[in-house]
Image: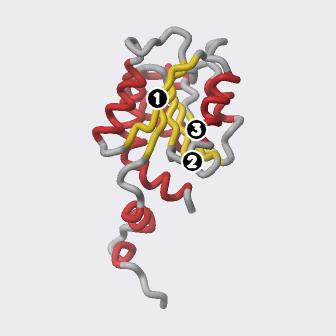
Amino acid sequence: MSAMSPNRARGGGAHVEHKALAPKAVRCYVLTVSDSRTPETDTSGRAISSLLEAAGHIVAGHAIVKDDPGLVRSTVARQLANVDVQAIITTGGTGISSRDSTFEAVDALLEKRLAGFGELFRMLSFQQIGSAAMMSRATAGLAAGKIIVSLPGSEAAVRLALERLLLPELGHLVQQARR
């Protein structure tokens, strides 16, 4: 019989061990995708930054770009090449209107998709807003060894995603992405 770690013996599982080894502070880049938001009206971008910092993470940069797939893709690609960034979090452009292009821009860059993130986000969102949650194309995945998360543009949605899903697992996600 193989020796089992104390965490596994207590039913903690590998995820407990992984979380113990995860970085406590993750360097994140926040990207707001919007045709209308300005630094003064970017409540979702500010909420992401505030929640990250309150949890002990580092906001390594923030930008607002128009909802243009090429612009979104090139901005995210620059951050994938930035050694000071471990995770990229976008807000906006994940709906189904003709101008919403963040999903396509980010999805084209992903090497691995975390389908469970979008599924869980929509489930939690459904509990708050009902069937309209199905229109969100929030997604997450890995590219170039980094985490990318695309969230809706609503401040309430951003807070839900960070508080319930992303902040509890951000260090663990980064730790696993580096393996």
Going 48% across and 58% down the picture, which residue do you hit? 175
Q: Residues within 10 Å of mark 3 (few under 14, many from 20)?
A: many
* Residue behind mark 1: 62
Please tell me which residue lies in front, 132 or 156.
156
**Mark 2 / mark 3, whichever is N-terminal:** 3
Mark 2 → mark 3, Cα distance in angstroms: 9 Å
Question: Disc 1 or disc 2, which is closer to the eye?
Answer: 1
Would residue 25 be visible to someone looking at this image? Answer: yes
Quadrant hosting residue 48 = top left
Q: Secondary structure at mark 1?
A: strand
Image position of 16 (left or right of 177): left
What residue type is disc 3 on?
Answer: Gln
* Residue behind mark 2: 146
**Mark 1 / mark 2, whichever is N-terminal:** 1
Return the mark for residue 173.
none
Mark 3 → mark 1, Cα distance in angstroms: 11 Å
What residue type is disc 2 on?
Answer: Lys
Asked whether the beta carbons under mark 1 and mark 2 sit within 8 Å of each other, the answer is no
Image position of 120 (left or right of 95): left
Q: Residues within 10 Å of mark 1 (few under 14, many from 20)?
A: some
* Residue behind mark 3: 79
Q: At which x and y percent is residue 170?
A: 43, 48
Q: At which x and y percent is residue 94?
A: 57, 24
Residue 175 sits above or below residue 44 on the image = below
Asked whether the beta carbons under mark 2 and mark 3 sit within 8 Å of each other, the answer is yes
Residue 90 sits above or below residue 27 on the image = above
Point out the image quarter for the C terminus: bottom right
Q: At which x and y percent is residue 122?
A: 49, 32
**Mark 3 / mark 1, whichever is N-terminal:** 1
Q: At which x and y percent is residue 127?
A: 39, 29
Q: Residues within 10 Å of mark 2 (few under 14, many from 20)?
A: many
What residue type is disc 1 on?
Answer: His
